[in-house]
Image: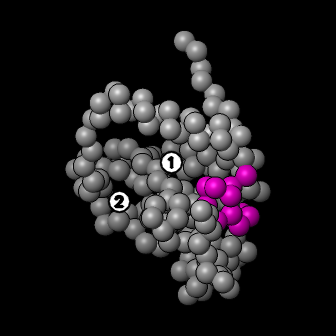
Amino acid sequence: MPLNHAPNGYQCPFCMIVAGEEGRATATIAAEVIERTDMATAFIASKQLLNNLGHVLVIPNQHFENLYSLPDEFAVPLQSLTRRIAIAMKHAYGCDGISLRQHNEPGGGQDVWHYHIHIYPRYRDDEYFPAKSTARPIAERVSQAALVRNQLALLGEQPVLATR
């Protein structure tokens, strides 16, 4: 199962942003960078949803293609920066809420081969969700949980289950 999809010779636009390179390949200039820490960078996204303007991307400063290759030590710094930016966006835009998105592989909607988290300002009736969902029966959900738990065990991971 391939986990990497960047074509040979891929020039990562997000690595260029971290390196401070500006131009057409990145579509981002230094003034769009909101914050940079030792581990992560947050900047305004060049492509935005019309009803959710001002969305932000948070990326690790090192190149990791997707969630599968992201080392655990980057998770907390990325989430910490994401949280701080989300709080700032809520105050700056006066939005009704915030949504986070993170895509992996082409089938998951990823189109830049560098791990990134989207932070969207949300507004009532903003038409953000095109997909419909429906409640699934408990037996089906239990079966789904067992499938993933079993796969964790096959991968050598032990699921952590909190007791009540």
The x, y position of residue 93, in whole percent, is 40, 53
The x, y position of residue 120, in whole percent, is 42, 55
Residue at (77% x, 57% y) in the render: 38
**Residue labelled with disc 1:** 86
Instruction: Report the span colored magenta.
Output: 61-71
Q: Earlier in the sequence, mark 2 or mark 1?
A: 2
Q: Is residue 74 above or below residue 10?
A: above
Residue 153 visible to the viewer: yes
Residue 35 visible to the viewer: no
Q: In the image, is 114 to the left or to the right of 107?
A: right
Q: Is residue 63 magenta?
A: yes
Identify which amino acid the numbered label 2 is placed on.
Asn
Q: Secondary structure at mark 1?
A: helix
Q: How many marks?
A: 2
Tag 2 and tag 1, C-beta contact below 8 Å: no
Q: Is residue 115 magenta?
A: no
Q: Is residue 91 above or below residue 27?
A: above
Foreground of the two, 158 or 114 = 158
Q: Residues within 10 Å of mark 1 (few under 14, many from 20)?
A: many
Identify which amino acid the numbered label 1 is placed on.
Ala
The x, y position of residue 145, in whole percent, is 48, 34
The image's mark for residue 132 is none
Alpha-carbon distance for marks 2 and 1? 13 Å
Q: Main secondary structure of the magenta part?
A: loop
**Residue labelled with disc 2:** 52
The x, y position of residue 64, in whole percent, is 68, 63
Please identify the quadrant where the C terminus is shown. top right
Residue at (45% x, 64% y) in the render: 107
Foreground of the two, 86 or 8 = 8
Q: Residues within 10 Å of mark 2 (few under 14, many from 20)?
A: some
Q: Secondary structure at mark 2?
A: loop
Residue at (68% x, 73% y) in the render: 15
